Structures are given as C-alpha cells and as structure tokens.
Image (tube, rainbow, N blue to C red):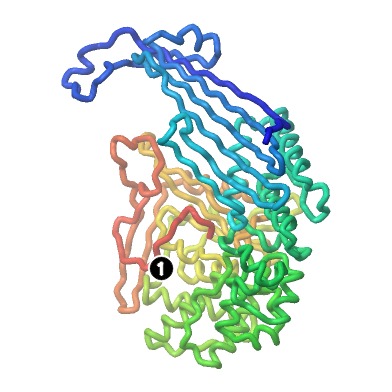
C-alpha cells in the first residue's frame, strides 16, 4: 500500500578534525608496533563543524571527517500511522581512504483500526544480514519505554523555543492523525510521558475495553506488569476493573468500589496489609482507599509474622497514623525493628503508645537504648568559641526569633530525628557532618540543617558548606527561611574561622568501655591534590558501626 508523508524534516551536521603532519619520535620510543596498522596521528587541536570544511577536507587523509544525517518522518499507510527517525552516519578516520556508514531507524507505529501499536528499532540496516531488529507490540506496562522512544525520535530538536514549537506541532499532528480529538477522555498534552499514557488509553479504547473515569490512576511509570493483558481482559468481557482485580488476585465489592475513585493504585500495599491484618480489619477501618492512594514506594516490609494478636492490634494503630501522615513510614519500620531487637537483647519492652506524642517518646527512648548495644552513647565536643558563635539567636525581618541548636549528644540527635521524622540520628558518627537544628521561637517549626566539613590540602584550609536543609518529614523549608539560613551560614563560617577548630567524640558502651576520638585532616594522594573529598576529614580511630549509609541521600 502506498505511503503518504504527513511530515518530514531533515537535519545535517558535520565534523572535521585536523591532525598534525609530523610527530616527535621521542614521545613514541618503545611504543608497541603490533598495535599500529595505519600509523600514529596526533590531533592538531583544530576542528570545524561546517559543511564547507567537510567538503574541503573530504579526501584529505590528514583529517577525520563525519557527516550525520537525521530525518524525522510522520507517514501513513492504510490504517497504519508511523512516527520514525532515520539516522545515517558517514565517517572516515584519519589515514583511511574509505568511508564507513551506519544506518539506524527508530519507530512508533499505530494501527488505527485495531488500536495495536508497535515500538522498536532497526540498527545497522545498511547490512543485509548483520543487523538488529526489535519490535514490541502493545507494551502497555512499559510507559518509560514508550516515552523514551518518543524522546529518541524527537531528539534532533534542540532545547529552545523555536525547536520546541516545531516538536509540539509534530506531536500534535501525530495525535490528531490518530484521532485523539474524538476521545474526550484522552489527555491532549504534548508531554512525552502524558502522550505515552494517552497512547495506552487510545489502544484499549479502540479494542472496546470499558475503562474507568480515573484510568490515569492505573498507568503509572513506577509499576511493571501492572495492567492486565488482553487475554485477561477478554475473559472478563473487556471490563477493565474486573480484569485488573483478577490480574492482581484481589476481590471484594468494597475494593472494586474504591478502585473506581482512587488517585493511585498501590496494589502491593493493599495486598500486603490484607494478608497481614486480615480483610475484615482493613474493611472495618475503611482504609482501602488510603492504601491504594499510598505512593508506590510505600509498602510494609518489617512486620514479623510471629507477632501475637495483641501486638498486631497495637501495630495497626501505628499503621493508621502512618497512613494519615502523622508518622513517617521509615520511622514506623524502624520502630518495629527496634522492638524486635530489644526483645532479642532481653529488654522488657512493649508497644504502649496510645498517642502520637507517646509514640515519638517511645521511639526516641528505644533509639537511645539500641545505640548502647550497637554503637554506644555518643557525645560530640567542639571548641567553646564554635558553639557560642553558631548558637547565637537570629531574627527575621518581622523580629521573630530563631534559635540554632548545635546537636552534640545521642539524646539530641535522637530527639531531633523523632521530632522531625527523619534519620538524622544516624549522622552522629559521620565525622565531616555538623548538624544544626534551627528552631522557630514558637517551639513548633524546625529545620534540620547539615553542614559538611571539607579540607582543601592545597591551601591547608578547612571549609564548611551547607548541604542539606529540610523540615519535618524531609519536606522543603518555606522560602521565608532562606534569609535566616543565610545568616546562619555566616555564623557557622565565622565560628569555624574565629579560632582553631577542634572536634572530639566520646563513646560510652554498655560494657562501660569508653572510646575517645578526635577529628584529623588527612592529606590525599598526589593525584587528588586541590580537590575536595569527604574522606579527608576523619576520626583518628575507627570503631565498629552497624550503620552503612549513602550520605548523598536526604535525612
């Protein structure tokens, strides 16, 4: 069937790299001659990216030349509509007379009659035999793949206003040719990920699948194999919700009702909760919708199977607090881990918290107790001048006071961690990390601020820089705090430079052993001079620690 081009645009680019016509022989004495086939060439440092230079040096053996041709095509052939990118690369290396070529094609094709769509590529198709061909039919569960294919096909467009307009027009023409405008429920957004979602919805609608109004809640980039395949849909008379429930092994009218109104579909959280606490418990407390609407990375994983009925009752209360956002999921999981560990150590602990304040207190106490078994009780000591300068009160433009508190002991780190629902308690043994709790005078709002010490060996100078500044539950601090933090930055830097900075750590273990450490500045290897490395600011002694952290993560 004859193809009809709806859109076509070509892009050409050139590269010309000039090489020297001589070499300094002494630089290559002892060079492995077996590795030399076409000689040794050194770049002259001169290069060009215009067509004129390319043509001028086309046959110059002292140059390497490359021509790249890219062509975006939107075409239709009968019921099929295809969006394609063709890439051709012609390249001649320095000292070589002949050109090599590479031809690739990336495509997204949609059958407008059946709704089937195909994502794929053909690589090295200049070869008759040694080429690679990949075609995936209806990859509805792989939004990332569809979105990346759209990004690849439109990659020749630059990130500027002119090219952005052409790209949007192309995708708009693609959507219009598919008939998206005939489906009011389809999002007409030209964002790649939204277009991928619309394509999945379009495919199912064309197949006659009965989709819920909140279908976007079911197509999320976080999940793989989340949507039912077409054979499952056919078994359930193309009713999407019924097929979805069958696909995930869930049932019940209440779940079905909530699937029609949810904003997310965290099936893993729902299934695990039902398995652990029982369907009746979940149904009676009306938390099915809350479980479905949990972020995709929220799912219990620390709840032991051997808990008694009474223990599960108390855990369920804590779990509801977590669903309501009153406590952090990681905090709840840590709490259960502490409970199990302390019972293993022979401690007489029980789940007694009846309010959120009780829970925070219980969690802080257990955290301190755990630390005596795992790491001991830590106390950081700084020189007096550093503490006095850092902890000076700060006032905003309205005269409201903010009090910086330099955290020093395990108690203070644990209290901050419990209050803010973060994991800053684990930072106390991290030598280069200095934690300041910046507190509003109202006694409610706090910001947990991390400063990082780094040593510049080329200048023999210790520096400090703010690297993290987060509020409760690791949320961003309001913009109104920016001015206050800038003043705090000044106080911290002044404190560091006003006198010789010293930092010590004293750790008391449960066996009454005490370990004292001090901060040292360690010189790097010669190849690293002048660069910053966290490892250059260290304790002079290494003690066993149960915590291994990626310190690039949030608190």
Category of crowding for the residue at label 1, using alpha-carbon neighbours closer than 10 angstroms: few (below 14), some (14–19), many (at least 20): many
Q: Nearer the viewer, residue 125 or 415?
A: 125
Q: Position of residue 187 (x, y in %)?
A: 77, 51
- Residue 325 shows up from this direction: no
Q: Position of residue 411 (x, y in %)?
A: 49, 71
In the displayed structure, 428 sits above or below 281; it is above
SS under mark 1 = strand
Where is the N terminus found, in terms of image quarters?
A: top right
In the picture, measured across the screen, residue 94 lies left or right of residue 395, that is left
In the displayed structure, 117 sits above or below 506; it is above
In the displayed structure, 451 sits above or below 22; it is below
Q: What residue do we see at 72% from left, 65% from top?
A: 263
In the picture, measured across the screen, residue 306 lies left or right of residue 504, that is right
Disc 1 target residue: 378
Q: Nearer the viewer, residue 117 or 9?
A: 117
Q: What residue do we see at 40% from left, 65% from top?
A: 547
Q: Position of residue 63 (x, y in %)?
A: 40, 13
- Residue 373 shows up from this direction: yes
Q: Nearer the viewer, residue 492 or 190?
A: 190
Q: What residue do we see at 70% from left, 30% from top?
A: 5
Q: Position of residue 111 (x, y in %)?
A: 68, 47
In the picture, measured across the screen, residue 530 lies left or right of residue 221, that is left
Q: Nearer the viewer, residue 79 or 519?
A: 79
In this view, which residue lies farthest toward the front?
1
Q: On the image, which quarter does residue 268 sit in?
A: bottom right
Q: What residue do we see at 61% from left, 53% from top?
A: 138
């Amino acid at each position: 069937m004859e193809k009809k081009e709806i859109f076509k645009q070509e892009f050409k680019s050139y590269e010309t790299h000039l090489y020297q016509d001589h070499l300094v022989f002494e630089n290559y004495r002892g060079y492995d001659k077996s590795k030399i086939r076409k000689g040794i060439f050194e770049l002259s440092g001169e290069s060009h990216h215009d067509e004129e230079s390319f043509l001028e040096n086309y046959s110059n053996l002292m140059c390497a030349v490359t021509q790249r041709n890219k062509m975006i095509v939107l075409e239709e052939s009968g019921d099929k509509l295809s969006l394609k990118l063709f890439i051709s690369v012609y390249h001649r290396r320095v000292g070589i007379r002949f050109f090599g070529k590479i031809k690739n094609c990336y495509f997204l094709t949609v059958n407008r009659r059946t709704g089937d769509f195909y994502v794929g590529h053909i690589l090295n198709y200049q070869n008759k035999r040694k080429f690679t061909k990949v075609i995936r039919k209806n990859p509805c569960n792989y939004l990332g793949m569809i979105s990346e294919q759209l990004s690849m096909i439109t990659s020749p467009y630059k990130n500027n206003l002119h090219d952005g307009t052409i790209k949007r027009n192309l995708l708009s023409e693609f959507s219009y040719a598919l008939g998206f405008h005939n489906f009011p429920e389809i999002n007409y957004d030209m964002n790649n990920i939204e277009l991928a979602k619309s394509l999945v919805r379009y495919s199912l609608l064309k197949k006659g699948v009965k989709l819920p109004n909140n279908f976007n809640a079911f197509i999320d980039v976080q999940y793989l194999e989340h949507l039912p395949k077409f054979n499952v849909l056919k078994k359930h008379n193309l009713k999407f919700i019924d097929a979805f429930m069958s696909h995930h092994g869930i049932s019940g009218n209440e779940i079905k009702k909530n699937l029609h109104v949810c904003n997310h579909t965290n099936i893993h959280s729902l299934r695990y909760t039902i398995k652990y606490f029982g369907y009746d418990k979940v149904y009676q407390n009306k938390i099915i919708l809350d479980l479905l609407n949990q972020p995709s990375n929220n799912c219990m994983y620390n709840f032991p199977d051997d808990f008694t009925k009474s223990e599960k009752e108390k855990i369920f209360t804590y779990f509801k607090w977590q669903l309501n956002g009153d406590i952090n999921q990681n905090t709840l999981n840590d709490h259960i881990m502490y409970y199990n560990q302390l019972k293993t150590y022979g401690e007489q602990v029980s789940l007694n918290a009846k309010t959120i304040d009780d829970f925070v207190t219980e969690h802080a106490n257990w955290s301190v107790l755990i630390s005596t078994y795992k790491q001991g009780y830590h106390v950081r000591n700084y020189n007096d001048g550093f503490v006095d300068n850092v902890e000076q009160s700060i006032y905003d433009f309205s005269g409201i006071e903010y009090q910086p508190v330099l955290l020093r002991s395990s108690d203070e780190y644990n209290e901050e961690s419990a209050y803010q629902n973060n994991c800053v308690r684990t930072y106390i043994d991290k030598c280069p990390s200095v934690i300041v709790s910046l507190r509003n005078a109202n006694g409610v709002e706090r910001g947990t601020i991390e400063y990082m010490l780094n040593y510049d060996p080329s200048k023999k100078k210790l520096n400090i820089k703010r690297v993290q500044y987060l509020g409760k539950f690791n949320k961003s601090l309001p913009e109104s705090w920016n001015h206050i933090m800038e003043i705090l930055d000044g106080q911290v830097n002044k404190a560091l430079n006003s006198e010789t900075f010293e930092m010590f750590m004293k750790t008391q273990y449960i066996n009454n052993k005490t370990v004292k450490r001090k901060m040292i500045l360690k010189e790097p290897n010669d190849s690293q001079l002048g660069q910053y490395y966290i490892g250059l600011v260290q304790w002079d002694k290494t003690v066993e620690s149960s915590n291994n952290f990626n310190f690039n993560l949030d608190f």
